[in-house]
Image (cartoon, rainbow, N blue to C red):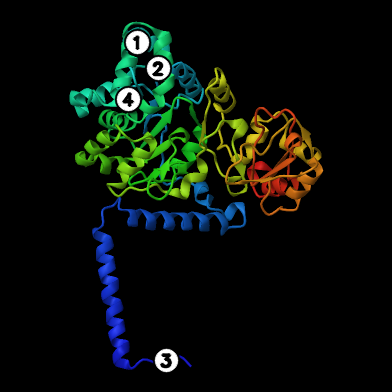
Amino acid sequence: MGVRLPKKAQRRLSHLAIVLFVYLSVWYIILPPDSPLRLAIYFNHSRLRSFTARYSYTSYFHSRDAYLYSSPSPYPIDLSSDVGYLIKTGYGTRHRIPEQLEAFRQTGDLLGQEGQNYLVVGDWTAVNATDEATTLGATIHDALKMVLEDKLGLTYETSPRFVKYRNLQRAVDNRDDGKASTLGKSFGWELDALKFVLGMDLLYDKMPNKKWYIILDDDTYLVRPSLHLLLSNLNPQEPLYIGNAVGDYRGRFAHGGSAVVLSAEAMRRLFSRPDVISRAYLDSLEETWGDKLVATTLQKVGVYLDERYNHHFNGEFPAITRIAADRFCSPIVSFHGLRRPGDMVQIGRVLGHASQPVLWGQLWDIFGKFPMEDLAHQDVQVNQDHTGEVDGKTKGWPGIKSADTCKAMCDGDRERCLAWTFIPEEKRCITSQSMIIGAEHAQGKVSGVSWPRVDALRRRCPLLR
């Protein structure tokens, strides 16, 4: 039998519990929005909510994405006029801009009109801005110059990042393209951190009445019908900050290359706090990743990354995009890493005229060398790699002697394994919870997918049947 406390002691404990609850609640409320405790609680709550949404449904029509297919959509949107787009580039990567703009023109002119619907920011000032705009197809706004001269002041020009910027600008002014390109490629990633907040500031100043704002790298592509489906089901008057979540609880942020999406309300809250913006400009002198700075700045005004929409955003180019079971039937909004000449234009040709949302599970049929159904008869493929780089969703097995053994290991784990790769020279087997169309440098490797599981995923999606 348990110990039974006297009624008087029970009442005291009840009163103590109430007082403790009130005290903790008040203490939590008065904590700064970006305090570690608040961030930890929000992070774990968000992960739990995302996990529950991912695994609590069994069919396509009762999935976490079912709300997307309600008709009519609750929040009608015109992607060319209701969205403000910010494109970030650098001197070393500026050659990507013409292809990116051309790819978006093939989507029915997704970006709309420059200056009214989109802006491009960079890290240099052209000697002849008119000629450069003609060559690149857009005016490049020098974010570094504006941060230094208009936001922080010339007292900061000796900071390491501005010293690098001055060296780059000196080469541009001297028309030494070779040196400027080399410098831009060597430390352009570091200068990139200064473009985010200034770009957002400039975008919001010039386009204050948009419903949504999207930040893109110059090697990022957006799938128009997928983006339209997503945003037409989200309320821009809620403080939404969404994208491909990376990082830990202290700085959980939307990966910039996968596209960062902010609602009108999120931007309003941010730019109604000049003190927070001023702090962000100072922080940009030290912060390694500009996309992380966006998150830590938004946290100060109580806007946090909403991870319910992570599964729509992608940080890779098509061939190595990880197709996982938990998003097989979901619309995919973005691709990243389209850096080689022709890559961006090619994806624009392939997806530019898509009239329906593109699903992750469709990528093989769209970009693969053969239809996905052929995998039913191709248990083993030589010189292929369908698992890709080793990460948290792959498993390496040493001492494996044959491809058949590796395949059997994947087949024996049908609850999780989607693909396998055997490396004969290393006698190593890699199994993965996701699959890719095909990684480069696969010479000598042997690979395959778990067709029974892939086929079962296909059958759950009416659009893939």
3D distance between C-alphas at marks 4 and 2? 32 Å
Can you give x and y, in whole percent of width and height, for residue 321 in the image? Answer: 59, 36
Judge whether 418 appears above or below 121 on screen: below
Residues at marks 3 and 1, CA–CA distance in whole angstroms = 81 Å
The amino acid marked with disc number 3 is Val
Instruction: Identify which amino acid the numbered label 4 is placed on.
Output: Gln
Q: Earlier in the sequence, mark 4 or mark 2?
A: 4
Upstream in sequence: badge 3 or badge 4: 3
- Tag 2 residue: 183
* Tag 2 and tag 3, C-beta contact below 8 Å: no
Q: Nearer the viewer, residue 371 or 157?
A: 157
Give the number of the disc on residue 3: 3
Q: Sort mark 4 into few (<14), some (14-19) or many (20+) by Cα contacts within 10 Å.
A: some
Circle 1: residue type: Ala
- The residue labelled by disc 4 is 116
Binning the other alpha carbons within 10 Å of mark 2 as few (below 14), some (14 to 19) or many (20 upward) gives some
- Of the pair 144 and 405, the residue shown nearer to us: 405
Side (left or right) of 217 relative to 8: right
Q: Amino acid at mark 2?
A: Leu
